[in-house]
Structure formats: C-alpha cells, structure tokens
Image (cartoon, rainbow, N blue to C red):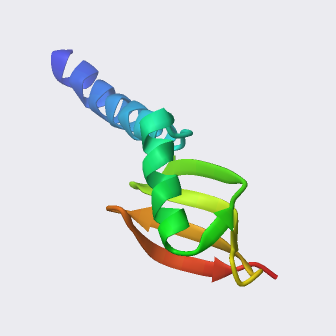
Amino acid sequence: MQKLMLALAVPALATAALASSASAGDRPPNPAERARVEAVLSANGFVSWRKIERDDGKWEVDDARHANGRVYDVDIRGGRIVKRELED
C-alpha cells in the first residue's frame, strides 16, 4: 500500500513543483532591480520603456524606445542586453 501511495505522490509533487516554479518566474522588479535594468537600458541608448518583467531567468522589457526612434522588445540577462527585437 505504501508503494502505491508513493507511486501516486511523486508525480503529483513533481507537477506541483513545476507549476509553482513557472509562475514564480513572471514578476515585476523590486525597486533595486528596476534601477539596475533601467541603468542598462539607458546606457544602451534607450530613452523610455513600458513594462519590465522577470521571466525565464531574464528581464523582459516591452516597447523600449531607442534614441533613434525605433521601438524594441529587449531581453536583459546578467546586466547585458542579450536580445533586441524590433517592433513593427
């Protein structure tokens, strides 16, 4: 009986852990994190942005407007921009 309960409990716990870790990744920055992300954006010529969110171990910035007038979605990891995607 204990083996059956263990066999049922392990997959349930694994599923719960995956669900909680996925949802825990999507969050807004705290004030210190926001300041660091904004410093990276400013240092790279961005003058405004709409939304900053932590997702999959990186910061995702929506609608970051560059000084050249173009608008990008930007990913930041480790204090560096790792991706710029031009918005249409």
**As drawn, 28 above or below 37:** above
Q: In the displayed orientation, state which residue is furthest to the right.
A: 88
Q: Is residue 9 left or right of residue 73?
A: left
Q: Is residue 53 left or right of residue 4?
A: right
Residue 52 position in % (x across, y down): 60, 50
Q: Is residue 17 left or right of residue 66?
A: left
Of the pair 40 and 55, the residue shown nearer to us: 40
Residue 37 position in % (x across, y down): 48, 54
Of the pair 19 and 79, the residue shown nearer to us: 79
Residue at the location (47% across, 57% down)?
Answer: 39
Of the pair 62 and 79, the residue shown nearer to us: 79
Residue at the location (30% across, 25% down)?
Answer: 9
For the C terminus, the image quarter is bottom right
Residue 5 position in % (x across, y down): 26, 19
Residue 15 found in image quarter: top left
Residue 41 position in % (x across, y down): 53, 65
Residue at the location (46% across, 63% down)?
Answer: 40
Q: In the displayed orientation, state which residue is furthest to the top.
A: 1
Residue 12 found in image quarter: top left
Count of number-bearing discs? 0
**As drawn, 84 above or below 57:** below
Of the pair 11 and 28, the residue shown nearer to us: 28
Residue at the location (39% across, 54% down)?
Answer: 57
For the N terminus, the image quarter is top left
